[in-house]
Amino acid sequence: MAKEDVCEVTCFDEEKVTKVKNELSMQNTMEVSKLFKALADDTRVKIAYSLSVEEELCVCDVANIVGCTVATASHHLRLLRNLGLATYRKEGKLVYYSLDDEHVKQLVNIAFTHQKEVALRG
């Protein structure tokens, strides 16, 4: 039985396929997939969103916002930092995190905007 969301015949537009394959070969898809993998965790999404709302938060603030231990917050923040999504600075005994740049903030905000639009469509 054929499904509605699958082509019923096998054919392709050679010009489009070649164009996109060439474009794709010049992109670092593995690194981008790591970025999305980092955000594929509910706690890290909460942290990223929190850092998009408040420019900078200390690890203790993050732990209280997302409802986890300081150790857990620190672990997730370190992972976000290692993947280039967050940055930190130390001030005395406190460590403050922020999103790496405006692109990360936009990515987080666009994801939430899209989720709301999808929810409204049903």
Image: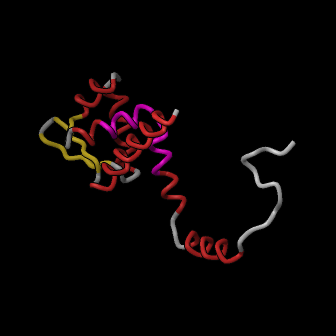
Residue 11 part of the magenta segment: no
Q: Nearer the viewer, residue 53 or 96?
A: 53
Locate residue 35, reporting x and y percent.
45, 51
User: Which residue range is magenta in the image?
Assistant: 35-49
* Quadrant of the frame with the N terminus: top right
Q: Residue at x 50, y 45 (%)?
A: 37
In the figure, 112 relative to 22: above or below? above
- Residue extending furthest toward the right: 1
- Residue extending furthest toward the left: 92
Q: Residue at x 35, y 42 (%)?
A: 78
Locate residue 52, reporting x and y percent.
27, 42
In the figure, 78 relative to 84: above or below? above
Q: Quadrant of residue 61?
A: top left
Q: Main secondary structure of the magenta part?
A: helix
How many numbered discs, if any?
A: 0
Q: Nearer the viewer, residue 122 or 19?
A: 122
Q: Residue at x 33, y 22 (%)?
A: 67
Locate residue 12, reporting x and y percent.
74, 68
The chosen color scheme is: secondary structure
